[in-house]
Image: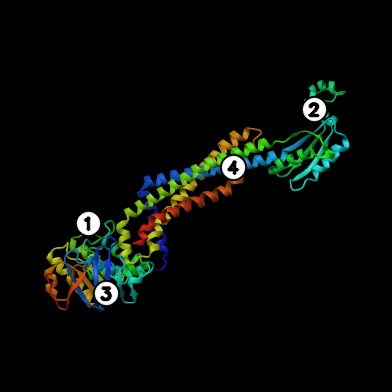
Amino acid sequence: MIIFNNVTKVYPNGTRALKNVDLEIQDGEFVFIVGASGAGKTTLTKLLLCEEKPSGGRITIDKFNVSRMSRFKVPKLRRTIGIVFQDFRLLPNMTAAENIAFAMHVVGESKKTIKARVANFLKLVGLEEKGACKPAELSGGEQQRVALARALVNNPSVIIADEPTANVDPYMAIEIMELLLRVNKLGKTVIVITHNVNLVNYYKKRVITMKDGEVVSDRKGGMFDEV
Amino acid sequence: MRFRFYNVGYFFRLAFQGIFRNSLMSLATVFVLASALLVTGCTWAVNVNLDHNLQEVNTYNKIVVFVSKETEDHTTELLREKILNLKNVSVESVEWVTKDQVLRNLFDDYGDYGDILQMYDDDNPCKDELIITYSDSSKVTDITYQIKNMNEQEDTFGSVDKINDRREVAQKIDEIKNIISLVFSWIMILLLVVSVFIIMNTIKLAVFSRREEVSIMRYVGASGFFVAFPFVLEGIFLGGFSAGVAFGLQYAIYKVFAVKIVGDIDIISILPFEYLLRDFIITFFVIGIGLGVIGSLISLRKYNKD
């Protein structure tokens, strides 16, 4: 479970990016976080990944108190969170399979486990035939699916997708969303940060709307609020 | 994180990749760090050899006290005993050489030409000498000062004509040693600081060229050690390689310059390279690898905070 309790974030230049945010996301939930640029979505993500520390309040993710976490414990937290970026961030000199394997390698998995799981996850995202392709040889949608497989391969309990459909065509956007829903059905908490009105309105999941660093609406089965 | 042996190969591969990817900076690092180590080695070699020569000078060096011509034998003996009984000035022995013996020694020293000195047989111009042997060259000033005092004391008044010590030689060698140490130390410090900066920049370049990989590693939960170790290893390799280069150059310089050229000069005694070998290896590799580690850790500090 993710809990934001009266969380405030003020950057050193004085910008108040988050103002007294209270939020609870249950295990296995699917949540859209929406809002205009500067609303505080990126800061929220950074706080979840412990890239930034809150200026006030308390953030808890499962057993981790993120607000007071030492930097030595951060890797442990990050292993419980999978992240998918808008720009995929695949390593260009590695194949699709190697990109997925890399995420397991750096956390110390054995070669045998890596080999078996990479094959499974390539299959899960429908790219079993393209494991040997480098990112440049894949379409945007395929690259995003590789990125999703990489985010999932270490079996995190939370998936954060930051604008996952921004760089893909509408058909591929649906495909990626369907994949995220499948992941959610496997019991993972999925948080999608997006500007895509159509997707939000189509899926009718919980929608948290942010504006000027505050949560202005939080609706289950909600729609994209124009704020 | 669990330790995997295959990670060792991975760390080594990344470290070598980093070195060759930024080959120009790596070369600059090796050049400057090896130069710094070479200066360190040369300073040290010069100092050790000067110390060694200084010790030899001290071993053969003695203070000679020329006794006044008018001094009675019993006063000379008293003076000898007083010098021998001086406390805390490291006097080991005092040998009394009579003026006749001094003249005979001169005959011997002049060899075939010694006959010329026979004209002095009846009117010996030499004086009795007291030859003092000491163990600590830093006490020479004390010894001469106390002997001069004895010359003022009632029982040995006016017995000392002249004191001849080789303090000036020892002082000159000390001065040269200090100047060499000072100049070389500054050059060494300067080069070592420059080396650390170059290592830092080399590692920064390595981190920059792998920034995407590092960023992904962090997001998926790689430990700080896993992220940083290949870069630290790169610093260790650069430092170790520089130490190896410096050691090779030091060997060549020592063998050619010190042993062959300076070693031919009779009055200078040069220690064999093998005598310094172990200390050279330890010093070079400890400083080289140490600076490699320090440079890489400093350049990684910023990344570890993220």
Which circle marks residue A136 in the picture? Answer: 1
The three-letter amino acid code for the residue at tag 2 is: Leu
Please tell me which residue lies in front, A176 or A211: A211
The three-letter amino acid code for the residue at tag 3 is: Asn
Q: Residue at x 48, y 46 (%)?
A: B189
Tell me which chain the residue with mark 1 is part of.
A
Given this view, does label 4 or label 3 mark the residue nearer the observer? 3
The three-letter amino acid code for the residue at tag 4 is: Asn
Tell me which chain the residue with mark 2 is part of.
B
Please tell me which residue lies in front, B297 or A190: B297
Given this view, does label 4 or label 1 mark the residue nearer the observer? 4
Residue B88 coordinates in the image, percent (x, y): 74, 48
Q: Is residue B42 left or right of residue B219?
A: right
As measured in the structure, the alpha-carbon distance from the residue carrying label 3 to the one carrying label 2 is: 104 Å
The quadrant holding residue A12 is bottom left
Which circle marks residue B106 in the picture? Answer: 2
Q: Is residue B62 visible?
A: yes
The quadrant holding residue B228 is bottom left
Do pointers 4 and 1 mark residues of a single chain?
no
The three-letter amino acid code for the residue at tag 1 is: Ala
Residue labelled with disc 4:
B47
